[in-house]
Image: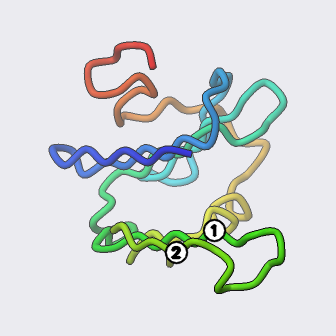
């Protein structure tokens, strides 16, 4: 998983896998989901992140095999992301809606080069 934040456009790109994007669904005017051919989530673009997710801090927690909280690794990166849940976005999406291309950076990055 990789998260890229572009300060000049206040856009975040969250990549869940490096698979090919076959469809992009617009959740709202600021959130777009990239899906592979089987409908699996490949990435998510969030525009106007400062407003959408208050990107002051990102919390990440990895839980070990035992499932114990202390067994995991905890690192604080940048808070809004911890409050922003992908599940909420997916629940609000309409699977029958049309495909829309987002205005943020392509998966290849700021200059459009391939990843």
Crowd class of label 2 (few under 14; some 14 to 19; many from 20; radius 10 Å): few
Q: Horizontally, is 51 left or right of 97 in the view? A: left
Q: Earlier in the sequence, mark 2 or mark 1?
A: 1
Q: Quadrant of the N terminus?
A: top right
Q: In the structure shown, which secondary structural element does the residue marked by tag 2 occupy?
A: strand
Quarter of the C terminus within the rendering: top left
Q: Residue at x 48, y 51 (%)?
A: 31
User: Residue 98 is drawn in which quadrant?
Assistant: top right
Give the left or right position of residue 34, taking residue 55 as reference. right
Along the viewing direction, whichever of 5 and 61 lies nearer the viewer? 61
Q: Secondary structure at mark 1?
A: strand
Q: Residue furthest left?
A: 8
Q: Residues within 10 Å of mark 1 (few under 14, many from 20)?
A: some
Query: Label 2: which residue?
Result: 74
Give the residue pinned by disc 1.
62
Q: Report whether 13 appears left or right of 87.
A: left
User: In the picture shown, does residue 5 fall above or below 82?
Assistant: above
Q: Quadrant of residue 88?
A: bottom right
């Amino acid at each position: 998983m990789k998260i890229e934040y572009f300060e000049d456009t206040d856009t975040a790109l969250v990549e869940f896998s490096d698979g090919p994007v076959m469809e992009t669904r617009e959740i709202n005017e600021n959130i777009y989901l990239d899906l592979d051919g089987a409908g699996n989530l490949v990435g998510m673009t969030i525009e106007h992140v400062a407003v959408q997710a208050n990107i002051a801090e990102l919390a990440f927690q990895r839980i070990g095999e035992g499932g114990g909280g202390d067994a995991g690794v905890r690192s604080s990166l940048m808070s809004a992301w911890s409050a922003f849940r992908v599940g909420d976005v997916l629940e609000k999406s309409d699977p029958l809606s049309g495909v829309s291309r987002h205005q943020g950076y392509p998966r290849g990055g700021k200059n459009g080069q391939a990843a």
